[in-house]
Amino acid sequence: MSLASAMALGDVASQMCWWSLGPKPSPAAVLKGNEGTERTLKLESRGGFLNLPTSPLMTCSIEAEEPSNRTELQPVNDQLDGNLVRRLNKDIGSFAMVAGPLSVSNTSAYPDDGRKVRISFKGLPGSYSEDAALKADPNCKSVPCDEFEDAFKAVELWIADKAVLPIENSSGGSIHRNYDLLLRHRLHIVGEVQLATNLCLLALPDVRAEQLKRVLSHPQALALSDTALNRLDVVRESVDDTAGAAQYVALNNLRDTGVVAGARAAEIYGLNILAEGIQDDSDNMTRYLVLAREPIIPRNDRPYKTSIVFTLDEGPGVLFKALALFALREINLTKIESRPQRNHPLRVVDDSNTGTAKYFDYMFYIDFEASMAEARAQSALGHLQEYATFIRVLGCYPMGVSR
């Protein structure tokens, strides 16, 4: 589904929980030694991750809409009926602004029918994203995927019920690629998970830390454990997934190679934990979003958070005026993120005194502490329409709770 089609609302705006108010925006790994030298590490995937046969517990990858260089794996858990693909365009319930607050008894995105909720995530079993999925729902059935976009598609194609997506880290900041995916796809935020990052140094049994010559992990994990790795004086090799690194070391019996990953990865792949909590910041946290095909219906009986994205008309102080709408209603903003519009990134200004100038045109992502069941939140978004050319509600969900 392209960005343009995801933002084309037309006459169905009243049936969906987002609004369009004008023109529609269109839509290697590196090895570092202790002397700054770099080389490339290639991890091939033929039929499975790192040359392993695919299994139901390993990965689910959905074919991309356009050709890409990444490995394409076939779904392995379900025999899909071709008609299921057509269901991803199913229209969903509305958060559309109404005269009074909404009231409903059920805040779950899915009825309780007794079956396990399937949650897709990027990575292999034992990854931090799977930890987040299990924190969101301890009884869930995890659905590993090859890429973030595959996790979205797994939900859209009904392979999974929900997806878990990391959106920001207290040390590394926002994950910009995932903000773009939120806009490109039509899933709804139904929860959030705050996960403490406990980085561990893993190795094969009977291997000591001083025997290690290199350490594999995701680039972010390597960066977050910089001080501990400097003391080891090892070569750092970036790979795509912490759990994938653990699996690679275990299956290839690499006794000179360590891994930075989670404790569950050590348990799953038979590695020993040489050290725990090796991250530089002991309070490091990652925030994950829980996404579903259908939104939950907001209430006002508990703290809620609402996430929106919008674009603004040109003019002095327009962003200030837009943000002031929330302050005037005593609505706390917890997150502001700007991203250039991908298909129309530049805005041209023609002034006869200064000549033609170009500058970036942005989309603004905002999280605020209010439920769409509250009149003040509905009023703020109604007033925002005076300045915005496009608004979409990404989700309204309980703060710090997933449903």
Image (tube, rainbow, N blue to C red):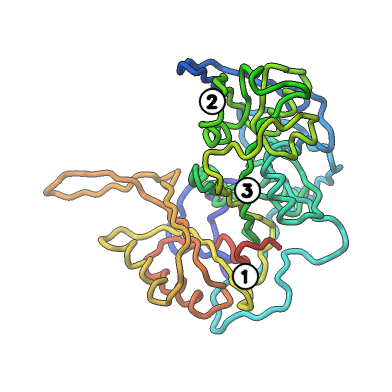
Q: Which residue is mark 2?
A: 231
The residue most toward the bottom is 100
Q: Earlier in the sequence, mark 3 or mark 2?
A: 3
* C-alpha span from label 3 to label 1: 23 Å
The residue most toward the left is 353
Q: Earlier in the sequence, mark 2 or mark 1?
A: 1
Residue type, mark 3 in image: Leu
Q: Which residue is mark 1?
A: 94
Left or right: 240 in relation to 86:
left
319 or 210, which is in the foreground? 210
Of tags 3 and 1, the one toward the viewer is: 3
* C-alpha span from label 3 to label 2: 32 Å
Labelled disc at residue 142: none
112 or 139, which is in the foreground? 139
Left or right: 112 in relation to 195:
right
Q: Is residue 35 above or below residue 199?
A: above
**How many residues crowd around disc 1 within 10 Å: few (fewer than 14), some, or many (20 or more)?**
some
**How many residues crowd around disc 2 within 10 Å: few (fewer than 14), some, or many (20 or more)?**
few
Helix, strand or loop at disc 1?
Answer: loop
Image coordinates of residue 140 in percent, x first then y, are: 80, 53
Q: Which residue is mark 3?
A: 165
* Residue under the image location 67 percent in, 40 percent down: 122
Q: Quadrant of residue 268?
A: top right
Residue type, mark 1 in image: Ser
* Residue under the image location 58 percent in, 69 percent down: 304
Helix, strand or loop at disc 2?
Answer: helix
90 or 369, which is in the foreground? 369
Q: Earlier in the sequence, mark 3 or mark 1?
A: 1
Q: Quadrant of residue 137?
A: bottom right
Helix, strand or loop at disc 3?
Answer: strand
* Residue under the image location 17 percent in, 50 percent down: 351
Of tags 2 and 1, the one toward the viewer is: 2
